[in-house]
Structure formats: C-alpha cells, structure tokens
Image: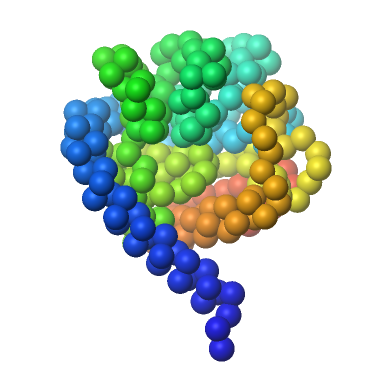
Amino acid sequence: MFTLNNLLNYTIKLYNLANYLLCFFLLLLYFSLKTNRKKNVNLINYKKSKKCYICGNGPSLIDTDLTLLDGDSIVVNDFFRLKEKYITFVPTYYCVVDSLYAMKKFSDKRDMLMNAYPNTPLILSSKYMKLITKLQHKKNIFFICEWGNLFNRRKRIDFSKLLPAGHNVICFCIFLAIYLGYDEIFLLGCDYNLFATQQPTHCYKVDDGSRKKNLLDIMFRYCFVTYVHYELAEYAKLNNIIIKNLSKKSLLDAYNLI
C-alpha cells in the first residue's frame, strides 16, 4: 500500500536528484568561491564557549533576557531590530540566508543589518552573488554554499565545502553550531508556529512588504524543514551533541523541550 510516508520519501529522492543536476550547473560558481569557502575555517576563531544559544525570531524571544546567556550566541535575519532593546548584548555570530536581503529594494534593510554589529562575523548565503565581490574583502563577512542535497544524519557538515540544504535559517544555525564544535546547543525564539496561528509570528513587527504565503505553501515547506530537524536530532545523538529547545510553547518537538 502506497502511504504518505512513501510519497514524502520519493519526493525527497526526487528533490535530491534535481539538486544533483543543479550542482552540476553551479560547479563554476562553487569553484570560483573557493577562496571564500576556505575563509570559513576562521569562524572558529570567534568561539568563546562550549555552549551556544541560537536565537530565532519567534515572539517568545521577547520574554528572554539575552544579557543573561552563559555562552555564545547566534542571531538571525532581522535581529538588528532588537538592538535598542538589548543595548549591551552583542551576538557571537549573525546568520542570514533569506533571499530577501539580496533584493535591491531591500538594500537599506541590508545595510542596517551589516552595520548593526560591525565586530560580529556575518554569515551570508552565496545566493547574494552580486554582494560577494563588494564584501569578500571584509574580514568578518563569510559566504556559504548551501545548495546541496537535503540534510540527513549521514551528511558531513563542513562550511568550507558544499553544505546540505536546510531550507530554514535555524537549521543552518544548528549546522554552524555543530561545525564549530559546540557540546550544548540551545534554541530560543524557535516557536515554529507560522502554520498554526493568526497571531504575530516574529519578535518584531514585520513591515518588509512581502506577501505572506498561503497555508498550503507554508505546510509544504515545513514538511521538509521538519524532516531536516528530525535528522539533525538523530545526528546530534550519534555524535554526543546536546540540543535542547528552550522556546516557550514551541511546536518543534524534534529536540527536548525544556
């Protein structure tokens, strides 16, 4: 009997096959980014702790005092909007993979992001090809190649090479934390409820003018993202890495909810 799980598995195989073809066409870009990719080994130099807190942009982050964190931190996307709220807080890493930041009409937003924490390493997607030439000389700007096959527990995570696909900035932050060798990884502001609420889904007001996707689009994407999270949870178990979700009322159950 053909089940929905069969359908998901075949869809993932089809996705990976399509990505193999995509990788073939992107080989020139991949090799042209060799210098940028090799630079990523320097990300370890910013690490100061064995603990890492990944700060998502869910509304539960509002109730968290980030100045009390007893370890390193990774923030994402529009976190710069909270700079006035956390005047003394400086993140250890800043990760952005949203394609919106590559668009010309969001150049002002991109500039605010890049100027918010000048001494914090900023990890960007290589989808921002037009920005690479402009920014690659800056010491704390790093580019990743994240168009590999969908992540599974057998994948090797190496930021100096082709990364597996995660389809969610939190997945890439977990990739980063694992790559940097953190023993304990804690998730904050990872409410994971975009598909299940009419309430605000960010810890800041969203005013970027983008159209909200319909429920079908959201659920389809979350299906693959959730698959990656479950695989990451298994990867962590196999490699003795602790991942805990500290986000209040989070729907992400792949990791232990605290």
Which colouring convention does the figure follow? rainbow
Labels in figure, total: 0
Residue at the far right: name it: 198
Q: Nearer the viewer, residue 150 or 175?
A: 150
| The image quarter in which residue 138 lies | top left
Q: Would residue 254 be visible to someone looking at this image?
A: no
> 222 or 93, which lies in front?
222
In the picture provided, is 89 more to the left or to the right than 25? right
Vertical comparison of 76 with 133: above or below: below
- Residue 80 at x, y percent in the picture: 58, 18
Q: Quadrant for the N terminus, please.
A: bottom right
Task: Give above or below for 120 relative to 189.
Answer: above
Q: Residue at x 40, y 55 (%)?
A: 151
Residue drawn at 28 percent across, 19 percent down: 133
Residue 18: image x %, image y %? Answer: 36, 58
From this viewpoint, which residue is outermost toward the bottom?
Answer: 1
Report the front residue among 240 and 100: 100
Query: x, y (%) of residue 191?
Result: 68, 43
Where in the figure is residue 153, as x and y percent of width and height? 39, 61
Indicate left or right for 84 with 36 as reference.
right
Choose between 233 and 98: the one closer to the eye: 98
Q: Residue at x 50, y 33 (%)?
A: 98
Residue at screen point 61% across, 15% down = 83
Query: Relative to residue 195, is residue 28 drawn left or right?
Result: left
| Residue 4 in sight here | yes
